[in-house]
Image (cartoon, rainbow, N blue to C red):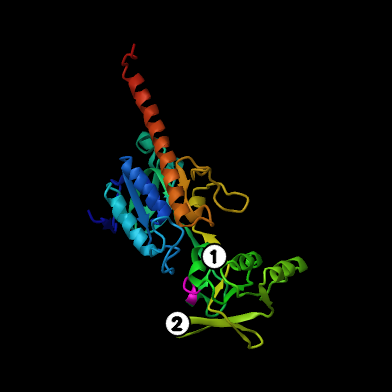
Amino acid sequence: MGETTRTMTGSRDDERYDVVVVGAGAAGLNAALVLGRARRRVAVVDAGEPRNAPAAHMHGYLSRDGMPPAALLAVGREEVARYGVDLIDARVEHIEGAERIEAAEGAENADRLAAGFLVHLAGGPVLRARRVVVATGLRDGLPELPGLAERWGRDVLHCPYCHAWEVRDRPLGVLGTGPGAVDQALLLRQWSADVVLLAHTLTLTDAERERLAARQVRVVEGRIVRLVSDDGRLRGVELANGRVVPREAVFVFPQPVPRDALLFGLDCARDDDGWVATDRTGRTSLPGVWAVGNVADPRAKVVTAAGMGAAAAFALDHDLVAEEIDQAVEHHRASGAALPA
């Protein structure tokens, strides 16, 4: 069976789901897969902006190593569609919680909408959901250096465990645009004997210089003005004095910026670092809302994000079952049925 994808228009007050998943990356799709197999009515809403779109391949995912990220997502969408999951190409503008729904629609609708959410899509359609999984990921805030964004995901890289094997034994550079650059340079030394830390705006301590020297990582002083490319390949890094340091690939720590507006629009609590606070299953402080993948953990790789989605789905389904048992017991009591002997 092929994937069924639809673009929604107009009012969809009849669209009611056990779970709406926002985001169709590895985390969101894996959550939808588990929930679909649990015979839940699930919709996945996706705006089509995967973080790893610039990368040609992904790595560190057993049985999928070297697979193009887009291919993984295509297979995942086909798999969830087999279990009746609706795949909706749209952007979620905001989500309303149960309290706001009841206030807006009147107490007489409380039973119909209890513990639910209204998921508002761009253009007006609305989905009703008993639970919500937010898997909207993050975007990489890149240093504003000319030539860097154009090479991002190709020979301007960020994760040694994801990309260093492909550039092993080549001249590598680390851009000193943040405090993690020293540790990144020290780590990269195991993939190449020719690693340079381009200090840029960093002020290195004596201890850091000693560690770099001991690890045979050279330090090049001077402010970076641009990355130099030719014939579609990185050639080097140009400094303010005009010198070009030849490099075939450079690594940089981007600033992770979570796409978390939906979560904090619901007043989910933050942790000490400002990220959404969750338990081990991805459950947020707001009952009925889970957050998984890079929106909750900037360090999560594709395989990790997929696992987070599965863990959330297991916990979420148990949460739904507990609610259904409570409702069944109340109905049983109200009906006056005799208890079993």
The structure residue drawn at horizontal position 54% and vertical position 57%, both measured from the top left corner, is 299
SS at circle 2: loop
In the shown orientation, is residue 242 left or right of residue 100?
Answer: right
The answer to whether one can see residue 11 in this image is no
Q: Residues within 10 Å of mark 1 (few under 14, many from 20)?
A: some
Residue numbers of the magenta segment: 151-155
The structure residue drawn at horizontal position 36% and vertical position 54%, both measured from the top left corner, is 45
Q: Is 251 drawn above or below residue 113 in the view shown?
A: below
Tell me the residue that label 2 is attached to: 232
What residue occupies the far right of the structure in this picture? Answer: 206
The structure residue drawn at horizontal position 65% and vertical position 85%, both measured from the top left corner, is 240
Q: Is 98 drawn above or below residue 173 in the view shown?
A: above
- Foreground disc of the pair 2, 1: 1
Q: Position of residue 204 (x, y in %)?
A: 73, 70
Distance between the alpha carbons at the discs numbered 2 and 1: 22 Å
Which of the 4 quarters of the picture holds residue 256? bottom right
Q: Position of residue 51 (x, y in %)?
A: 45, 63
Q: Looking at numbered disc 2 in the image, what kind of residue is underneath it?
A: Gly
Q: Looking at numbered disc 1 in the image, what kind of residue is underneath it?
A: Pro
Tell me the residue that label 1 is attached to: 160
Q: Residues within 10 Å of mark 2 (few under 14, many from 20)?
A: few
SS at circle 1: helix
